[in-house]
Structure formats: structure tokens, C-alpha cells
Image (cartoon, grey):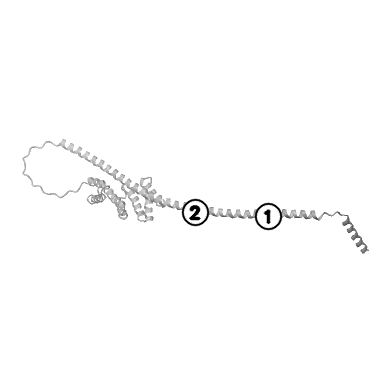
Amino acid sequence: MKRNLSTFALGALVGLMIMARPTPVYGVSKEIVQLQQMVQTLTDQVAALQKAFLEKNAVMTQLVERSADNTNKLQAAIDNLQKTLQTSMGSQITSTNQRLDSQQNRLQLINDSVDELKSRQNKISDQLTQIRQLIESIQPPAPVQQAAPVQAVPQAPTLPPAPALYQQALSDVGPDPKKAMQEFQDYLKYYPTGERAENCQFYIGEIYYTNGDYQRAADSYHDVIDRYPDGNKTAAAHLRLGMAMLEMRQKDAGAKELRLVIRKYPRTDEARKATDRLKSAGLPLR
């Protein structure tokens, strides 16, 4: 029976194959060829796109690298320019501060000279008033017999008056600092307790400072501070002492002295100068 069934199935399959209308082989081959061509075209296009992408990616990579190099070069140039500007501005600020200090010292000398002239004028006026009163109170003297001439006895040379010596020293500071130095020293020698002794000691330090002899200038400022702790030049002496120490590369000691000026003499011209000097040296204010 199984054999019969197999024969029947085989016959049915053959009949179905005969009844079926097969598609021509030529049409199938043509469609396959077209499909293959389309696939090849797409493959070529994908390859071309990939190649173009790789080429553009390479170009972009080069551009990014060049941009990074240019950025680094530009940053280096900016850093160098900033350093150059800082160095140049720092030296210019220092030079300007020194010139300002010199001009302010000259103005201070002029103010002191004016004060001295006013003091001398007042003293002369008082002396003239006293002389006038004395003359008015004196009675005419009685005639006296002429005495025999007395031989003049040579006298020891007299010291220059303190106000005149001090005024002469101030006037010589600009044109002849060496002469002014000697005159200030003479004042301290002949009038150690004179009312301008403190000023003389201070200006001796200023002459040393202007000449670049910072150690002697510092010694002179120390004398002002030690001898006249409550004088009118004490604050200025502390200021100039700190500046002289900075010039001698003694940064810690100089900064300490300038901070003392700011703390001890606030809202003064000396405190402002001390603040400016610390800032120009790149040192903290506290």
C-alpha cells in the first residue's frame, strides 16, 4: 500500500509540474542582473562616501591640529607680551615713583624754607619793635669827654646764626648737595639742640639716598627716629628707611618698616606713599 501511495504522490507531483506555467528563465536572469548592478552601484557609492568622509576627516584633523598649534603660539605670544608689559610697567612705575619722591622732597625743602623765612621775619619784626620801644625809653645821654682810643683786640670767629646756616643749607641742596651736606652737619655740630636739628639730620639722609648711598641714608633715618621719636620728620624717616632697605634688597625689613608707616600714621601722605611702594614691589600690605 505504501508503494501505491508513493507512486500516486509521484504522479501527482508530475502532474502539478506539467500544469504549472513556469516563468521564463531569461526574465529572472535580467532582474537578477539589474539587482546586482544596483547593489554594485550602492556599494560603489558607499565606498565613495566613506573615502570622502575619511579624506574630509583627515583635513579636519589637520585643521584642528593647526588651530591648536596657532592657539598655543598665540597664547605664548600673549604670555610673553604680558611679561614684557609687566617688566616695562614695573620699571616705569619705579622710575616714576623715584621722580615723584625727588619732586616731593624738593617741595618739602621749599616749604621748610618758606616756614624758616616766615619765622625769621617774625623774629626780626619783634626785634625791631623791641628796639623801637627801647629807643623811645632812653633819655639823651649827657656829653662826655672823649676818651683815649682803645686798641682793638682780635676776637675769635663767631659761629653762623642757626637760622641763616639752616636756610643756606636748604638753598644749596639742589645746586650743590655736597656743600649742603656740610652745612647740615655744621648745624648739628654747632646747634645740636636747635629747632631745625631734626630736619638737618633728615636731609642728610635724603642727600645720601639721592646719591644712591642707601646704607648711609638708612643710618641717618635711624638717627632721626632714635633722637626725635615724636618729631615732625619721624613718619617721613620711617618711610624713607623702608624704601632704602628695599633698594638694598632687604625686602622683609623694608616691607616691615613701610607697614609700620601705614599702621602708625594712617591717612597721611607718608602712609599713601608706603602703600604705593609696597604695591609697586609686589609685596602684601599686611
Q: Amino acid at mark 2?
A: Lys
The residues tagged by marks 2 and 1 sit, at their Cα atoms, a distance apart of 43 Å
The quadrant of the picture occupied by the N terminus is bottom right
Q: Is residue 286 visible?
A: no
Query: Closer to the camera, 51 or 139?
Result: 51
- Residue density around tag 1, few if under 14, some if 14–19, many if 20 or more, within 10 Å: few
Name the residue carrying label 2. Answer: 73
- In the image, taking residue 32 as reference, residue 4 lies left or right, namely right
Query: Which one is earlier in the sequence, the residue at label 2 or at label 1?
Result: 1
Q: Is residue 236 visible?
A: yes
Classify mark 2: helix, strand or loop: helix
Q: Position of residue 243 (x, y in %)?
A: 35, 52
- Residue 39, image quadrant: bottom right
Foreground: 38 or 136? Answer: 38
- Residue at mark 1: 44
Q: Position of residue 268 (x, y in %)?
A: 36, 45
Residue type at mark 1 is Asp
Residue most extreme to the front: 26
Which residue is found at the position 72% from the left and 54% from the top?
37
Residue at image coords 80%, 55%:
26
Q: Residue 85 versus residue 199: which sits nearer the camera?
A: 85
Q: Considering the numbered disc 1 on the image, is that residue within a helix, a strand or a loop?
A: helix
Label 2 Cα neighbours within 10 Å, binned few <14 / some 14-19 / many ≥20: few
Q: Are marks 2 and 1 in contact (CB under 8 Å)?
A: no
Q: Please provide percent x and percent y for residue 31.
A: 77, 53
